Amino acid sequence: GENVEQHPSTLSVQEGDSAVIKCTYSDSASNYFPWYKQELGKGPQLIIDIRSNVGEKKDQRIAVTLNKTAKHFSLHITETQPEDSAVYFCAASTRNQFYFGTGTSLTVIP
Amino acid sequence: DTAVSQTPKYLVTQMGNDKSIKCEQNLGHDTMYWYKQDSKKFLKIMFSYNNKELIINETVPNRFSPKSPDKAHLNLHINSLELGDSAVYFCASSQAYREQPQHFGDGTRLSIL
């Protein structure tokens, strides 16, 4: 089955700086890569996703890049704000089964 | 309107009891899921289910069983609860005909005394 690794497990940045979270996957059949943000006491919420036929996607301060050859994808958050503090999960999907990374706890220091 | 709703939000019970968690989605999705999130925040799929197929993660004990009265509901029944079952359980839903994002509920925190 698919194996998704996520790094780092914790990340602290100063407000206004950028944050980058990286994931690797093992199954070359995976073709959909969503990113989720989980705030305390809430369920994971989709923030951005990318499909295997696209190399990069951007939505305001958030961007995701995908390297299919190397089997890795990354989340980039620019101009971080305190409300970006949360746990972020990457996932790789094949045949609609999601395999989640182990999560990154992001803290944005005001 | 809440897209995926779970009840109860908190469930405190004793070892050996049987309990159920309910999940409803109003998104018109045809596939629903149950996940378990442990204290380290690891999210593990337990079941995925649509009207044609139930996929069970083989590591899930058979004390856990999903029951779907209709497309909009997928309840989780747990028999003979054990201390290790303490976790947050999330329900999710999606459209299965192509790769689509899953929408999550806010979770049920299960605590076994």
Image (tube, rainbow, N blue to C red):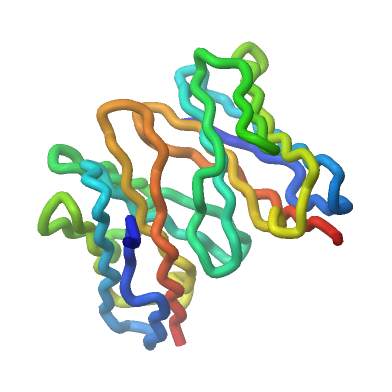
Examine the image and state in which quarter residue B106 appears.
Answer: bottom left
The residue depicted at 26 percent of the width and 73 percent of the height is: B20
| Residue B54 appears in view | no
Which image quarter: residue A40? bottom right
**Side of B9 where A64 appears, left or right:** right
Image x and y of residue A34, in percent: 52, 35
Looking at this view, is B54 or A8 the one in front?
A8
* Left or right of residue B24: residue A92: right
- A67 to B107, vertically: above or below: above
Q: Residue A98: which quarter of the image?
A: top left
Q: Which residue is the extreme one toward the front?
A: A60
Q: Vertically, is B81 above or below A10?
A: below
When the figure is inspected, residue A65 is found, relative to residue A16, above or below; the finding is above
Q: Is residue B31 left or right of residue A79?
A: left
Q: Which residue is drawn at 58% across and 35% down?
A: A4
Q: In the figure, is residue B31 to the left or right of A62?
A: left
- State the residue at coordinates (44%, 82%): B112
Q: Which residue is drawn at 85% across and 47% down?
A: A16
